């Protein structure tokens, strides 16, 4: 094999499409290392016309790091708990995937003490229209912030709350039980996050953020909304229009993503996702706050 070929999917190099690899993603060591290096360099990788089995999907992702198993396991693929199913597909009249998952810009696991490092989503069955996924470049968002805002955010953390916002983001799901609330306490993460492999700084804020330490609550909520809107500017965003067999690998430490709707009455969407365990977010070294 001559190695993978990369085609940039945005002018600034946020995201690359990978070709020249087998549709099963069974790669020799050199090819895998080239793909992994490209992932860290471009933050998201797009693969086309894959025909991975769940076993091959799991095996490829495991080469990138330890796998995370979603809990509760209601929508994990039977026989393959490492694969999380999203979409409106049914078998025997029973939903096998989580409907309307991922609406609103976020990074996977941002509301957990140890957020997920990466995610790999395979389009097993996709609608002919709608259901796109948007990806935001959080390196670029941080770099483009006014220096005064960077100074204001330096050293600060945001509070992320599943308990406070579950009913907002998942109104179609049952309310959290008291046990579930105890299992998902609020967490604090640095807003300027340093990537452990690249050393670059990303803006780390998303739909589960509710407060910024050291800033009055209402002012903090307004700042969070402003930062989120800033990161979603079109020049920071890549829209992926899914084709059957597509797969996208993204780095949750420096990107956000957002699902978009499709006609669930007319079309079926079935996506398989593997998820990488992560590490405690690192605070980036930034200029000290003004006193």
Image: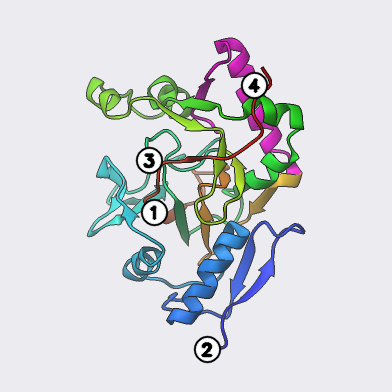
The residue at which mark 4 appears reads as 223
Give the Cα distance between marks 3 and 2. Answer: 37 Å
109 and 152: which is toward the camera: 152
Image coordinates of residue 67 in percent, x first then y, are 33, 56
The residue at which mark 3 appears reads as 114
8 and 33: which is toward the camera: 33
Q: Residues within 10 Å of mark 2 (few under 14, many from 20)?
A: few
Asked whether, in this view, residue 160 is left or right of residue 214, the answer is left
Numbered disc in front, either 3 or 1: 3
The relative height of residue 194 versus residue 246 in the rendered view (above or below) is: above
The relative height of residue 235 versus residue 18 in the rendered view (above or below) is: above
Give the Cα distance between marks 3 and 1. Answer: 11 Å
Q: Which residues are magenta?
A: 206-234
Image coordinates of residue 217 in percent, x first then y, are 55, 12
Give the Cα distance between marks 2 and 1. Answer: 27 Å
Instruction: Work out whether mark 3 precedes mark 2 in sequence or the reverse, and give the earlier one.
Output: 2
The residue at which mark 1 appears reads as 276
Q: Are marks 3 and 4 in contact (CB under 8 Å)?
A: no
Q: Residues within 10 Å of mark 1 (few under 14, many from 20)?
A: many
Secondary structure of the residue carrying tag 2 is: loop
């Amino acid at each position: 094999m001559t190695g993978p070929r990369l085609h940039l999917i945005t002018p600034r190099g946020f995201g690359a499409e990978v070709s020249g690899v087998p549709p099963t993603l069974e790669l020799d060591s050199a090819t895998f290392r080239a793909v992994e290096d490209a992932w860290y360099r471009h933050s998201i990788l797009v693969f086309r016309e894959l025909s991975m089995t769940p076993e091959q999907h799991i095996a490829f992702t495991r080469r990138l790091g330890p796998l995370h198993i979603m809990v509760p396991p209601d929508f994990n693929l039977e026989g393959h708990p490492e694969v999380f199913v999203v979409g409106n597909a049914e078998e025997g009249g029973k939903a096998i995937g989580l409907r309307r998952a991922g609406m609103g810009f976020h990074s996977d696991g941002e509301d957990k003490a140890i957020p997920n490092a990466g995610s790999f989503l395979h389009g097993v069955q996709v609608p002919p229209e709608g259901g796109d996924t948007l990806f935001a470049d959080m390196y670029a968002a941080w770099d483009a912030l006014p220096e005064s805002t960077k100074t204001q955010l330096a050293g600060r953390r945001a509070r992320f709350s599943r308990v406070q916002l579950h009913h907002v983001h998942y109104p179609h799901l049952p309310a959290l039980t008291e046990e579930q609330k105890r299992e998902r306490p609020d967490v604090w993460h640095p807003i300027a996050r340093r990537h452990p492999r690249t050393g670059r700084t990303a803006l780390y804020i998303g739909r589960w953020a509710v407060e910024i330490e050291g800033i009055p609550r209402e002012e903090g909520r307004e700042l969070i909304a402003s930062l989120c809107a800033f990161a979603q500017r079109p020049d920071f965003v890549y829209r992926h229009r899914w084709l059957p067999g597509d797969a996208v690998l993204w780095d949750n430490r420096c990107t956000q993503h957002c699902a978009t709707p499709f006609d669930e009455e007319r079309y079926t969407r079935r996506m398989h996702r593997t998820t990488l365990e992560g590490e405690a977010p690192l605070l980036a070294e930034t200029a000290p706050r003004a006193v």
